[in-house]
Image: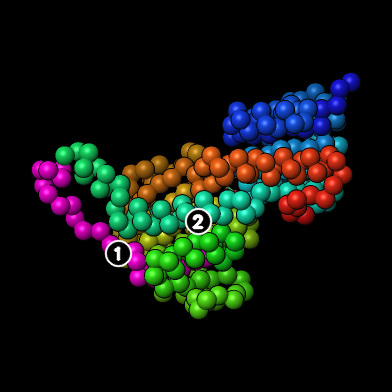
Amino acid sequence: MTDTPLLICGAAFTEDERARLSTAVSSVSVESPAALEGLAPGLRERLRVVAYKGQAPFGAREMAALPGLGLIANFGVGYDAIDLAAATARDIRVTNTPDVLNDDVADMAVGLILAQARCLLRGDGWVRSGRWSKYGEMPLAWKVSGARAGIVGLGRIGREIADRLAAFKMEIHYHSRQQKETPGWRYHADPVSLAGAVDFLVVALVGGEETRNYVSAEAIAALGPTGVLINISRGTTVDEGALLAALEQRRIAGAGLDVYLDEPAIDPRFQGLDNVVLQPHAGSATVETRRAMAELQLANIRAFLDGEPLPSPVN
Ligand code: 8YV
């Protein structure tokens, strides 16, 4: 019987990413965690590693279907789709791909701020449609440089965002569980007070149950009619119903979003709004960064199979 230790799990893997994994380690593939139970029991018993990519939950049931599983190597820094407590209870190690994507995700946050405040999409339409030559100048946009930014979650990505916005001469405010050492940025003990003090509220939290609806209806209300919400973290971190209502009723000025509660089938109300800029969860989606993430995922898998220390363990 041949040794097939690796299960590549997730429809989100590109052909290149799949090929990189399957060239390095003998593997089988499934499109989703739900498809796992369809594998022959003899094969499931031989699998020792799951290379995971996606947002679908990978929980205790999936782990139980793979009795020899020792490692879940996630493609992504956020591992909220994986039930970490269930993995730890079964002695299954979990790894992620931190740091290599910080720059790209922070760049996306800055891009969303600029696109939103400077109305870049409207400007593009103004030129393409010929409205420029017909009507002249488009209605004025809003200034970004020198405005007030509030970062919710000053982790590795939050810090990269704050550094970039500081270079835009913005006043930096932040909220995180603990006050941090910063170059004079203003700490707020809760997200509502932070939202009330800024023009742009940028959500850079980790996902998972602990941060569900962390940016609440109250925080969205505190942002006010000239405030803009940017989310590059997880759809779960913001009360999406409250956000949609505030956008529809113009109780906030707008939003720049890369993440949603249901991806990719997002709430269609977003698509009807003219005060949002929407991206398809593409914060880390550059050739360079996705390659680095794939390499780090594979490095974790190799280390596990070779009995070496894991480069980026989570548990
Ligand atoms: C995804 C992400 O991993 O790293 C994360 O947490 O959200 C993204 O980089 C990527 O979309 C692949 O699923």
What residue is shown at x 47% (from left), y 49% (from top)? 258
Q: Nearer the viewer, residue 27 or 10?
A: 27
Whether the magenta-drawn stretch holds residue 147 is answered as yes
- Are the two marked residues, 1 and 2, in contact with CB atoms closer than 8 angstroms? no
Name the side, left or right, on which 127 lies relative to 257. Answer: left
Q: Earlier in the sequence, mark 1 or mark 2?
A: 2
Query: Which sits in the foreground, 36 or 202?
Result: 202
Q: Amino acid at mark 2?
A: Ala
Q: Nearer the viewer, residue 224 or 245?
A: 224
Q: Amino acid at mark 1?
A: Lys
Residue at horizontal 70%, vertical 42%? 297
- Indicate yes or no whether the magenta region holds residue 121: no
- Judging by the rendered image, the residue that carries numbered circle 2 is 106
Residue for point 54% across, 46% down = 284
Above or below: residue 216 compared with residue 282: below
Circle 1: is it few (<14), some (14-19), or many (20+) Cα within 10 Å?
few
Residue 157 lies, in percent from the top left, at 56, 59
Give the crowd class for mark 2: few <14, some 14-19, many >=20 residues within 10 Å.
Answer: many
**Tag 1, which secondary structure?**
loop
Task: Report the disc number at residue 143.
Answer: 1
Q: Residue furthest top?
A: 1
| Snapshot quadrant of residue 72 | top right
The span shown in magenta is: 131-152
Q: Determine the image quadrant of residue 68.
A: top right
Residue 254 image offset from top left, x and y in percent = 35, 57
